Image (cartoon, helix red, strand yellow):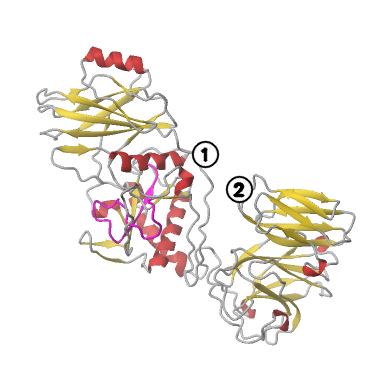
């Protein structure tokens, strides 16, 4: 292709300047001569890239004494079948000096090899810089978003999981010589990429980064966050929360910029992307005390803007596209309801079941069917603290559940979802159904501290009778992260032994990295087995235990919280494991 490209240049007499850049990037210069007032079309130009990734981007920057007129482009893979002429739009993010225009980046399919440009006003010569990029170094597959390692207190909206900069192939920091600057965010600005967006979306984020850094000359990607059509959230500009971006027509102070990948002047945003946007904006609204449905003066622009607004509200642009912009009124309402509604952003905050009479219903099953819950924001019910907890002063900030017994023996299992030392250290107590005078039946505060799985096995229950389960954090202070899963089981899975330290089996190291050793008591049943379950209850490792110590490989497991299960003919015992991965 390069040979044919050079032949075209020589035959047409084009003056070119080809400069090698970073991998996957190339530039050249084409000079439009003066040609009267009519339309002028360039010769066929080849794309000077040795290889291409999932797509090719093209950016046009023009300079001259007369920059009036429209510019258009058409492309082909073989010079025979040309696509239609497409108008090129000025990039509203760029503050061009006199005599220069820069247009929005265009995405070509990977097989595109040639193109032509034309302009409507040809009275003066124009120098056109042609900048090409293909994401050769971007990940071939989008990584799985990870939840940030932080905990909420009074804020009901956790920060959504996201793909960090390393995940999409970006550098860890801003460009050398740049220092992150921070602001008090008051307005949340929605954008669109105004280009094609196809998996892997990491490649699209990388292309935007290279445009902003290597073409525009900025310190970093301009957006704080980017959202793909499948709902994946990508971390944008380096520096963390409240870092000032470059996205709002030069008026970036007091803003957070969120860019939808895709072009929504013609296309419709997906439900997945809108849901991720609302969760992200709800978290930031809560984090910065922003009223999602309100408006106020934005000092940098001098405009009174909705707190959730579109780029076009503060600049001369169609961004974020008519179809996405039309969704913003609904986005404001949904964002507002996410953390003002009693169910909260994650469906469990603040807890509505923080009294015996408001207990949440549970169904007993033969296998654990977990229900997500939390003690975050709970109030004290006033029921005396059971002696099993080891402390009886202060008040327990508790939540309540209820279930109907189907056999005479059931197990209640509580699995904290946070990470120690901020996670719940659960106390689990079982009561009769009379909330006016709760009668304690049994109670457990398993050793192990914050984040440990706690299981209460209760015998001599009456089938058909309803019982109350009370869960609270050990101690007077509330856990920083009170989230947990709870389930009730019966049948063979409960057996005749209780989970707890008296069985003297252990797993180590915990946290684990690469491997895990299961150590059983000196005497153990001949028929023992081990399973490691993910948070969805699916086994990811299974092993028969024929020796006191068995080493289990964790190679290939994602980092996260798992349940270790020791199964014998007498029953099942479980422990919580934190896998750090490699």
Query: Residue 50: where, in percent of width, then height?
Result: 39, 23
Q: Quadrant of residue 535?
A: bottom right
Q: Is residue 114 above or below residue 353?
A: above
Q: Is residue 104 above or below residue 532?
A: above
Instruction: Name the foreground residue: 226 vs 348.
Output: 226
- In the structure shown, which secondary structural element does the residue marked by tag 1 occupy? loop
Decide which of tag 1 and tag 2 comes sooner along the chain. Answer: 1
User: In the displayed structure, does residue 219 sit left or right of residue 442?
Assistant: left
Picture disc at residue 2: none
10 Å neighbourhood of mark 2: few (<14), some, or many (≥20)?
few
Q: Is residue 165 visible?
A: yes
Label 1 – label 2 distance at C-alpha: 19 Å
Residue sitting at 21 percent across and 29 percent down? Answer: 128
Q: Main secondary structure of the magenta part?
A: loop
Q: Is residue 465 above or below residue 86?
A: below
**Is 319 inside the magenta-drawn segment?**
no
Query: Residue 573: where, in percent of width, then height?
Result: 78, 62
Residue sitting at 45 percent across and 45 percent down? Answer: 229
Instruction: Name the foreground residue: 104 vs 167.
Output: 167
**Is 252 inside the magenta-drawn segment?**
yes
Q: Is residue 89 above or below residue 459?
A: above
* Disc nearest the viewer among 1 and 2: 2
| Highlighted magenta segment, given as a residue range | 237-263
Query: Residue 262: where, in percent of width, then height?
Result: 38, 42
Q: Quadrant of residue 19?
A: top left
Provide the residue designation for mark 2.
582
Residue sitting at 34 percent across and 24 percent down? Answer: 48
Query: Residue 258: where, in percent of width, then height?
Result: 37, 52
Q: Quadrant of residue 398?
A: bottom right
User: In the displayed structure, does residue 409 sit left or right of residue 244?
Assistant: right
10 Å neighbourhood of mark 1: few (<14), some, or many (≥20)?
few
Provide the residue designation for mark 1.
141
């Amino acid at each position: 292709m390069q040979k044919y490209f050079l032949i075209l240049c020589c035959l047409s007499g084009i003056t070119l300047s080809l400069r090698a850049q970073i991998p996957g990037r190339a530039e050249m210069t084409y000079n439009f001569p003066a040609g009267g007032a009519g339309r002028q079309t360039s010769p066929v130009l080849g794309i000077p890239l040795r290889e291409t990734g999932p797509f090719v981007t093209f950016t046009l920057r023009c300079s001259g004494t007369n920059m009036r007129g429209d510019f258009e482009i058409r492309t082909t893979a073989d010079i025979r079948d040309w696509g239609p002429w497409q108008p090129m739009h000025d990039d509203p993010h760029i503050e061009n000096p006199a005599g220069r225009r820069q247009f929005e980046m265009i995405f070509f399919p990977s097989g595109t090899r040639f193109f032509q440009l034309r302009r409507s006003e040809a009275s003066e010569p124009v120098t056109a810089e042609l900048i090409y990029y293909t994401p050769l170094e971007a990940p071939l597959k989008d990584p799985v978003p990870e939840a940030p390692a932080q905990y909420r207190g009074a804020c009901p909206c956790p920060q959504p999981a996201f793909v960090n900069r390393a995940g999409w192939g970006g550098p860890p920091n801003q460009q050398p010589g740049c220092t992150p600057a921070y602001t008090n965010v008051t307005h949340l600005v929605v954008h669109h990429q105004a280009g094609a967006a196809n998996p892997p979306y990491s490649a699209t984020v990388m292309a935007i980064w290279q445009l902003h850094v290597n073409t525009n000359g900025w310190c970093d990607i301009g957006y704080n966050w980017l959202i793909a059509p499948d709902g994946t959230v990508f971390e944008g500009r380096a520096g963390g929360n409240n870092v000032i971006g470059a996205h709002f027509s030069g008026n970036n102070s007091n803003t957070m910029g969120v860019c939808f990948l895709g072009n929504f002047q013609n296309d419709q945003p997906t439900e997945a992307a809108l849901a991720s946007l609302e969760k992200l904006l709800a978290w930031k609204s809560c984090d910065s005390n922003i009223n999602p449905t309100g408006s106020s003066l934005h000092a940098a622009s001098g405009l009174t803007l909705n707190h959730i607004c579109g780029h076009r509200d503060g600049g001369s642009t169609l961004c974020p596209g008519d179809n996405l912009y039309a969704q913003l009124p609904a986005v404001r309402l949904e964002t507002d309801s996410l953390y003002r509604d009693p169910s909260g952003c994650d469906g469990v905050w603040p807890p509505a079941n923080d009294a015996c009479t408001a207990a949440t219903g549970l169904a007993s099953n033969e296998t654990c069917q977990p229900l997500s819950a939390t003690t975050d924001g709970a109030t004290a019910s006033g029921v005396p603290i059971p002696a099993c907890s080891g402390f009886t002063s202060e008040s327990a900030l508790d939540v309540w559940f209820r279930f109907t017994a189907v056999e005479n023996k059931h197990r209640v299992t509580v699995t904290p979802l946070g990470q120690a030392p901020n996670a719940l250290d659960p106390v689990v107590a079982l009561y009769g159904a009379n909330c006016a005078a709760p009668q304690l039946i049994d109670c457990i505060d398993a050793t192990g501290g914050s984040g440990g799985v706690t299981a209460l096995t209760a015998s001599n229950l009456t089938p058909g009778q309803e019982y109350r389960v009370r869960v609270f954090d050990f101690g007077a202070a509330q856990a920083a992260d009170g989230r947990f899963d709870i389930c009730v089981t019966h049948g063979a899975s409960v057996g005749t032994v209780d989970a707890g330290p008296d069985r003297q089996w252990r797993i180590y190291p915990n946290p684990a990295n690469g491997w895990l050793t299961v150590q059983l008591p000196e005497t153990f049943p001949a028929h023992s087995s081990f399973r490691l379950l993910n948070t969805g209850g699916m086994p990811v490792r299974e092993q028969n235990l024929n020796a006191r110590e068995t080493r289990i490989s964790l190679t290939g497991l994602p980092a996260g919280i798992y349940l270790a299960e020791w199964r014998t003919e007498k029953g099942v015992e479980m422990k919580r494991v934190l896998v750090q991965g490699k």
